[in-house]
Image (tube, rainbow, N blue to C red):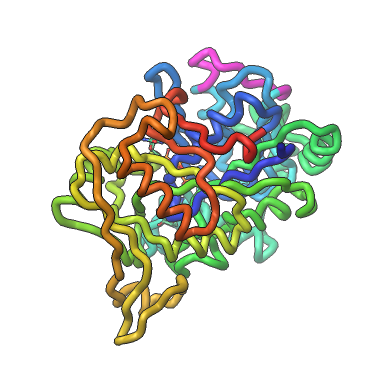
């Protein structure tokens, strides 16, 4: 059993992290975000009602949990104020007892949003000012949350009561053996250092980002779980070797409702890429995998998994961030038989169609780590626990 669990995206974001964090938060004490900003959109569905969190951690819908916005984030004061209000309007309790904002997080100024829209269009950013805010932080001209709330600004009065030294708080909570979830935003291939640069976001989204983004030592992360969709999606610009555009692509995009939770943009879709998966396992040090949206694959005759890239007569077996390879390679696929049954309400791994089980087993083999949770729908109930020993 673990005391602290990291939950990070293994692909290009939108893997279903919000759903999983909300599910695991039931047995946690603390949920902490460590990177990104309101470029993230994490969907939680409870009793058919949908809530999309952009900045507030996805533990907020559970009573009595502490939600932390770490120093590694960039915070748009207007968006956060509105998100808190939206939650309160839905009768969700949000007070300084259950939401804490790091005084060291950085502020997204309005001019950064304008700059993002103007200069970063070719990257397909979310236009939320995230990149320019991190650039200002790194060049030491940024404004920290504590600087912002010490002045009489719009939204500073609203946010001030939530602002604290989260570094001290989270270390004390971990030392008291509280159960902590680290909620990743984006996904491994969008990482500023390890992703498909320059088509990436501006923060370290991988497990390594937890140490810097919250101020804890690496030994305080006891488990790392990666969330991966049973296929792959990408929104914005950048290479996507296994993208599928024709009929099957339309099936995945339509049935999977693949439209961005933040911008509403359609997401490109493609087959599961085992090279990408193995890379995410390596750079995050993942212990186990959470496979989401398996229900969307129902009804396909054949399901493909990418097991290599062919580039100029060379067979590539390990993921690379070389854009020439990613843009011009031909994926090498393994074909697996599909299944027809609707699996979205199946309870228990054994009840899944044989071919769905085979698909899961093959992904485990290729990635070298076990699957601990399979998700079959957006709701909390549509979740199969396969290996409890990886959870709290
Ligand atoms: P996140 O950014 O990783 O939290 O993911 P998003 O919320 O942006 O996108 C995931 C979408 O898939 C949301 O609409 C979820 O409600 C939905 N979702 C999550 N898990 C499943 C699943 O297992 N099956 C289906 N059909 N939908 C899911
Ligand atoms: P969640 O947490 C999917 C993508 C953008 C763009 C690139 C850079 O919901 O998984 P940015 O605004 O960060 O400078 O944009 O990164 N992107 C995401 N894609 N899910 C996200 O977050 C994303 N956050 C950023 O589409 O391609
Ligand atoms: Mg999302």
- Counting from the top left corner in percent of width and height, residue 35 is at 60, 49
Residue found at x 53% / y 58%: 368
- Counting from the top left corner in percent of width and height, residue 203 is at 58, 57
- Counting from the top left corner in percent of width and height, residue 253 is at 25, 45
Taking depth in this image into account, of 390 and 337 the one nearest to the observer is: 337
Q: Is residue 31 left or right of residue 195?
A: right
Q: Which residues are magenta?
A: 87-97
Q: Quadrant of the C terminus?
A: top right
**Magenta span: helix, strand or loop, mainly?**
loop
Whether residue 375 is visible to the viewer of this picture, yes or no, is yes
Q: Quadrant of the N terminus?
A: top right
Q: Quadrant of residue 333?
A: bottom left
Residue extending furthest toward the left: 247
Taking depth in this image into account, of 191 and 369 the one nearest to the observer is: 369
Residue found at x 68% / y 35%: 68
Whether residue 109 is visible to the viewer of this picture, yes or no, is no
Residue found at x 27% / y 47%: 266
Taking depth in this image into account, of 304 and 242 the one nearest to the observer is: 304
159 is higher (above) or lower (below) than 4: above
Residue found at x 33% / y 29%: 344
């Amino acid at each position: 059993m673990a005391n602290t669990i990291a939950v990070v995206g293994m692909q290009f974001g939108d893997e279903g992290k919000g759903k999983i964090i909300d599910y695991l938060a039931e047995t946690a004490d603390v949920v902490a975000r460590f990177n990104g900003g309101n470029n993230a959109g994490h969907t939680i569905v409870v009793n058919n009602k949908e809530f999309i969190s952009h900045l507030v951690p996805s533990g907020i819908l559970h009573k009595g949990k502490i939600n932390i916005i770490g120093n590694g984030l960039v915070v748009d004061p207007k968006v956060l104020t509105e998100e808190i209000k939206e939650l309160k309007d839905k009768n969700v309790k949000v007070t300084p007892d259950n939401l804490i904002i790091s005084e060291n997080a950085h502020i997204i100024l309005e001019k950064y949003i304008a700059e993002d829209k103007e200069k970063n269009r070719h990257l397909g950013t979310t236009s939320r000012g995230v990149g320019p805010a991190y650039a200002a932080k790194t060049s030491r001209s940024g404004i920290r949350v504590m600087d912002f709330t010490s002045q009489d600004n719009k939204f500073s009065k609203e946010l001030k009561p939530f602002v604290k030294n989260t570094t001290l708080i989270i270390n004390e909570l971990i030392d008291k053996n509280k159960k902590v979830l680290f909620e990743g935003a984006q996904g491994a291939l969008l990482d500023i250092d390890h992703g498909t640069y320059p088509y990436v976001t501006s923060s370290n989204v991988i497990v390594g980002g937890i140490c810097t983004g919250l101020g804890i030592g690496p030994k305080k992360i006891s488990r790392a779980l990666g969330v991966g969709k049973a296929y792959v999606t990408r929104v914005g610009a950048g290479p996507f070797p296994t993208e599928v555009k024709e009929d099957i692509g339309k099936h995945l995009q339509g049935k999977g409702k693949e439209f961005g939770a933040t911008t509403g943009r359609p997401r490109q879709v493609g087959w599961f890429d085992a090279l990408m998966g193995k890379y995410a396992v390596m750079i995050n040090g993942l212990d186990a995998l959470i496979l989401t949206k398996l229900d969307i694959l129902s009804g396909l005759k054949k399901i493909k998994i990418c097991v290599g890239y062919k580039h100029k007569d060379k067979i590539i077996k390990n993921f690379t961030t070389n854009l020439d390879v990613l843009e011009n390679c031909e994926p090498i696929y393994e074909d697996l038989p599909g299944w027809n049954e609707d699996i979205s309400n199946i309870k228990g791994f054994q009840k899944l169609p044989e071919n769905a089980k085979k698909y899961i087993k093959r992904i485990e083999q290729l990635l070298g780590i076990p699957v601990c949770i399979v998700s079959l729908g957006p709701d909390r109930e549509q979740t199969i626990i396969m290996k409890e020993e990886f959870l709290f």
